[in-house]
Amino acid sequence: MVEELLHSSPGIANFGIFFLLGAVLLLIVLGFVTYGILAERKVMGYMQLRHGPNRVGGKWGLLQTVADVLKLLLKEDIIPKAADKPLFILAPVVAFAPSFMVLATIPFTDKFQFADIGVGLLYYIAVSGLTVFGMVLGGWASNNKYALLGGMRAAAQMISYEIPLVMSVLGIILLTGSLNLNDIVEQQENVWFILLQPVAFVVFFIASIAELNRTPFDLPEAENELVAGYHVEYSGFRWAFFMLAEYVYLFAMSALITVIFLGGWLPLFDFLSFIPGAVWFSVKFSAVVFVYIWLRSTLPRFRVDRLMEFGWKVLFPVALANIFLTALIKTLFF
Amino acid sequence: MTISGEFIAFMGLALVAIIGGVLLLNLTKVVHMVVALIFTFVAIAGVFVLLSAEFVAVVQILVYAGSITIIMLFGIMLTKHDDEGETTTGKWRKVFIFLGVVGFAVAVYIGIYDFNVVQVPTDLHVDNTMKIGEALYSKWVIPFEVTSVLLLVALVGSIILAKKDQDQKEGDKE
């Protein structure tokens, strides 16, 4: 259906349909964020021998996040007196907008996708790089030492880990011969790229955790050093926007890993193909999200000087070696 | 001239790009200037998309909006960042500059209005990433490699500059 829409001639009706679809996707993502946060708190709770939220909304705390968001919306909107006001207001928007933009290119199933761009993979990486401005500007505009340090750390970390992130997928691009995410999924008909490119997967996964600013790479918001990092001066709805951006990125990154390493909507075995692609996608997607939560509750935080060293001296050379090896194998055996 | 979706999109992007450029010149705080610059870069990437040069658009965002502006932000934040620009222009100078701008606009308008662009139906937008790659590695391979050597030289040079500073500091301590 979307395929036809994408190739139909543009017009008001077309615009309206896409607007509606975009709104629907936004609602889906908000739903994910609501229950993603709950799932994270529940899973972490059980891993730490607690129960997690269990009061609001029945035994499972199903309305806990809704209540939290409502509380955030009702909070007073504080802008510090010494803050750089226009930037302070702009920063959460700049942080959130790219996180939703990147979702356009991700193929959820073979029929449900918003934009079939030839350079889809590169588009994701380029646009997600814009979020870092929101963090830096937010930290800068707050006029607070902790916030500024957090913003600088966020920028340094995201730039450094973007390079291994891009380098690790180059192996897959070499094997596929395309940057298009649909082509990448279709190439995994027989065997998933996680088996063909295990090194790339490990490098990509580690770098993606750093890009998402999650533990063990959550240095930009390390509570014991920086209070809360770049959003220390933010409250209420603006703070919620930073949080929302973070979880939408979790959604987007998990979806991207599903697409490029785990075969997207394709079934595990051929005889299981009666199960629809959307189910396969969501199962793989949930597994990736679970691994992120799992790592968060099991690993301690990196030390700040080790972080850069690890990115540049370990991940980057490994990613380069992987490209070299892939190119060699491709010329010799394919 | 008919108003189509493409026209509206182009006008929006062009306005953002130009307003960003003007703000870059007129704002007084340096960090605000960089923000204006980001808007210009992203809007230009949008114009590339309209021309169906998707690869160039993405590279524009990745390199210009993503890396270069971050480096500028870092540079500003690590140096004297509270500096504000001062305007030292006189009244007559402003008048002359305004006349110059108007003259330039008229000249460009006259030049462009009747400019006959021969429309050649091309299929450059099909697989343009692949075509750029093929051109780079076959026709333009020597300039491409020379550019990479240039970048390498710049990289090594910056490392040497940074290293020298450190040595001197250590020397001072002793």
Image (spheres, grey):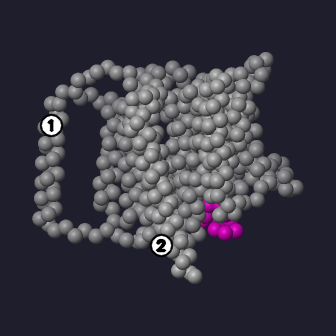
Q: Quadrant of residue B148?
A: top left
Q: Which of B77 and A174 is in front in this view?
A: A174
Q: Is residue A204 left or right of residue B132?
A: right
Query: Does residue A237 lie above or below B3 as drawn?
Result: below
The residue stretch that appears in magenta: A219-234
Q: Where is residue B44 in the image (x, y as percent from the top left)?
A: 37, 42
Q: What element does badge 1 sit on?
A: helix
Q: Quadrant of the C terminus of chain B?
A: bottom right
Q: Nearer the viewer, residue B95 or B143?
A: B143
Residue located 71% across and 60% down the image:
A302
Q: Residue at x 45, y 52 (%)?
A: B153
Chain label for disc 2: A
Mark 1: amino acid: Gly
Q: Name the residue under label 1.
A: B111
Q: Which residue is disc 2 drawn over?
A: A82
Q: Is residue B27 visible?
A: yes
Label 2 close to label 1 by CB (< 8 Å) = no
| Label 2: element kind | loop
